[in-house]
Image (cartoon, rainbow, N blue to C red):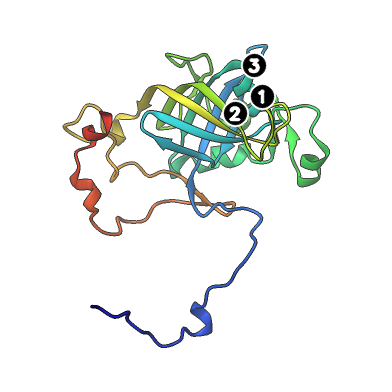
C-alpha cells in the first residue's frame, strides 16, 4: 500500500490564507450585452459574468440594471464578444448606465447616464438575424439568443425582489469574423486566432501562449453537439 508523500513545511510566502474578497472575478471573458427596452431603444452593457454549456449561455446580471430589466421584459439579447483589440470600446462603456436617474449608489461610484451607448463606445449597430437587439459591428463574435428562464439569486421569490439574476439564454445564432474561423472547418473557431478579452479583478487581460497541449482536445468538437 502506498504512503502519502511528505513535504517540508511551506514557507510563509506559499502559505494559504483565508480571505473574504468583495468580488470573485478570478478571470472571465468580457462580453457587451445588447438589449432593447420596451420602447425599442438599444442599450449596451459590459459584462464579465457569462458562462456557456452546450448551446446555452447563462448571464449573471443585476436585477435592477437597465440590461437586467430589458432581459426580463423583452427576452432577447446579443452577447457581443470583443477581442483584446476592442478593449478601448469596452472601457468607454465602463461607469455608464442606461437607467435614468442614476441610483445614488452608482452615482457615488462615478456612474453617469448615457442614452446612446453606441456613440459613447465609438461603435456601429449591425442588425441581428434572429433577435431584435442589434449586434456591434466592430466586435469579432456575436451570439444571438432568447431568454429561456430567469433564476433569481439569493433566495429571492422572483425577479422583482431579487438583487441578482442568472438568466438562461438559448443561443439562436453565432456570427464570427472569417479571421477567427478554423481553416478547413465550417463551424469552428480557431483558438490560436481568437484572442478573447478577459477581466480579472476589474482589470483587462488577454490570453498568453498555449500553456500545454490538452488531452481534452483529442475529442472531436462535433462530439459535443450530440
- What residue is pinned by disc 3? 41
Mark found first going from the N terminus, 1 or 3: 3
Question: Picture coordinates of residue 47 (x, y %)?
Answer: 56, 38
Question: Picture coordinates of residue 104 (x, y %)?
Answer: 83, 39
| Numbered tag placed on residue 148 in the rendering | none
Instruction: For label 1, count other residues whose C-alpha is less than 10 Å away and answer few (under 14), some (14-19) or many (20+).
Output: many
What residue sits 65% from the left and 17% below the top?
Answer: 37
* Label 1 to label 3: alpha-carbon separation: 13 Å
| Numbered tag placed on residue 69 in the rendering | 1
Is 142 in front, or is 150? 150
Residue 132 in the image: above or below residue 47: above
Report whether 182 appears left or right of 34: left
Please name which of the two marks, 1 or 3, marks the residue nearer to the observer.
Answer: 1
- What residue is pinned by disc 2? 44
Residue 202 in the image: above or below residue 17: above
Mark found first going from the N terminus, 1 or 2: 2
Please name which of the two marks, 1 or 2, marks the residue nearer to the observer.
Answer: 1
Amino acid at each position: 500500500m502506498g504512503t502519502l508523500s511528505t513535504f517540508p513545511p511551506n514557507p510563509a510566502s506559499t502559505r494559504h490564507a483565508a480571505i473574504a474578497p468583495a468580488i470573485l472575478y478570478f478571470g472571465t471573458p468580457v462580453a457587451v450585452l445588447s438589449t432593447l427596452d420596451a420602447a425599442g431603444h438599444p442599450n449596451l452593457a459590459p459584462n464579465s459574468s457569462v458562462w456557456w454549456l452546450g448551446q446555452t449561455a447563462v448571464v449573471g446580471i443585476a436585477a435592477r440594471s437597465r440590461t437586467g430589466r430589458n432581459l426580463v421584459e423583452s427576452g432577447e439579447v446579443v452577447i457581443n464578444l470583443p477581442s483584446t483589440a476592442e478593449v478601448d470600446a469596452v472601457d468607454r462603456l465602463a461607469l455608464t448606465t442606461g437607467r435614468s436617474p442614476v441610483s445614488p449608489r452608482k452615482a457615488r461610484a462615478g456612474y453617469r447616464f448615457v442614452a446612446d451607448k453606441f456613440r459613447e463606445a465609438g461603435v456601429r449597430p449591425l442588425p441581428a438575424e434572429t433577435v431584435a437587439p442589434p449586434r456591434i459591428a466592430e466586435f469579432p463574435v456575436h451570439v444571438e439568443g432568447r431568454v429561456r428562464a430567469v433564476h433569481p439569486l439569493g433566495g429571492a421569490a422572483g425577479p422583482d425582489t431579487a438583487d441578482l439574476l442568472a438568466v438562461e439564454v438559448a443561443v439562436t445564432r453565432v456570427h464570427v469574423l472569417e479571421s477567427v474561423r478554423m481553416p478547413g472547418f465550417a463551424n469552428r473557431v480557431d483558438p490560436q486566432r481568437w484572442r478573447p478579452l478577459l477581466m480579472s479583478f476589474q482589470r483587462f487581460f488577454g490570453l498568453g501562449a498555449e500553456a500545454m497541449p490538452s488531452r481534452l482536445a483529442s475529442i472531436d468538437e462535433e462530439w459535443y453537439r450530440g
